[in-house]
Amino acid sequence: MLPRAVSTGKEYCTGQYTTKGAAIVTDDPSARTGDTIWMLNTWMRYVATAGDTNGQLAVLEQLSSPAGDPPRHVHQHEDETFYVLEGRLSATIGDDPPVTAGPGECVFLPRGTAHGLHAETAEVRGLVLVSPAGFEQFFAAIGEPATTSGLPEPAAPDVPAVVAAAARYGVTILPPS
């Protein structure tokens, strides 16, 4: 069984983090700590990138809404953890029933396992942790500089461009089920 956890604030998110056999891809635009972007109807601020952590971890602050729900996908190289600060989100991980997380709770999404996220409230603010780092550059590759600290106007994504960029980072976008 793959490690996964939802924290209730009384324990820590669990899981094994390893870079063995993982390739950190950083060939796209360089996002730097403090940069803000709009990406797939979501606002993000780079808190720490591969350059800050010797490639071990990336941390991003994220503000999202149901318009910014990512498609179900699988990461080959990295684990993701979402720590919720405000709002509520649900995650579907593998074939397991959806789990939800609210303020002070987190969801662990292990590499190699299909997952999807859904904002259950009008807005969800949280921290995204990616280990090992490198995948944070995907967001920069498909995003654009944010001109405010709020959500962008919802817009339809360029699906072929997103799928192609994701593939460069070892991520497979899955068809809707």
Image (cartoon, helix red, strand yellow):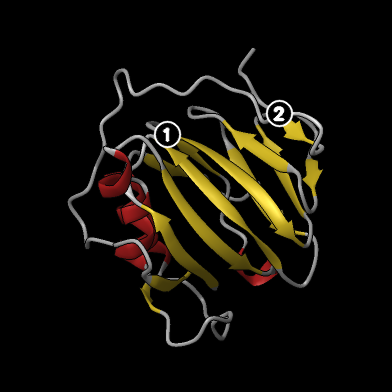
In the rendered structure, which amino acid carries the disc numbered 2?
Ala
In the rendered structure, which amino acid carries the disc numbered 1?
Glu
Q: What count of labels does the image hold?
A: 2
21 w.r.t. 117: above or below: above
Closer to the camera in the image, 86 or 98: 86
Q: Residue at x 81, y 32 (%)?
A: 10
Q: Residues within 10 Å of mark 2 (few under 14, many from 20)?
A: some
Q: Which residue is mark 1?
A: 78
117 w.r.t. 2: above or below: below
Closer to the camera in the image, 149 or 43: 149
Q: Earlier in the sequence, mark 2 or mark 1?
A: 2
Is residue 129 rendered to the left or right of residue 11? left
Query: How far apart are the two marked residues, 2 and 1, measured between alpha carbons?
Result: 16 Å
In the picture, the disc for residue 2 is none
Could you say whether the residue bearing mark 1 is in a helix, strand or loop?
loop
Closer to the camera in the image, 22 or 83: 83
Q: Residue at x 71, y 44 (%)?
A: 91
Q: Position of residue 133 (x, y in %)?
A: 35, 41
Q: Quadrant of residue 93?
A: top right
Q: Residues within 10 Å of mark 1 (few under 14, many from 20)?
A: many
In the picture, the disc for residue 5 is 2
Could you say whether the residue bearing mark 2 is in a helix, strand or loop?
loop
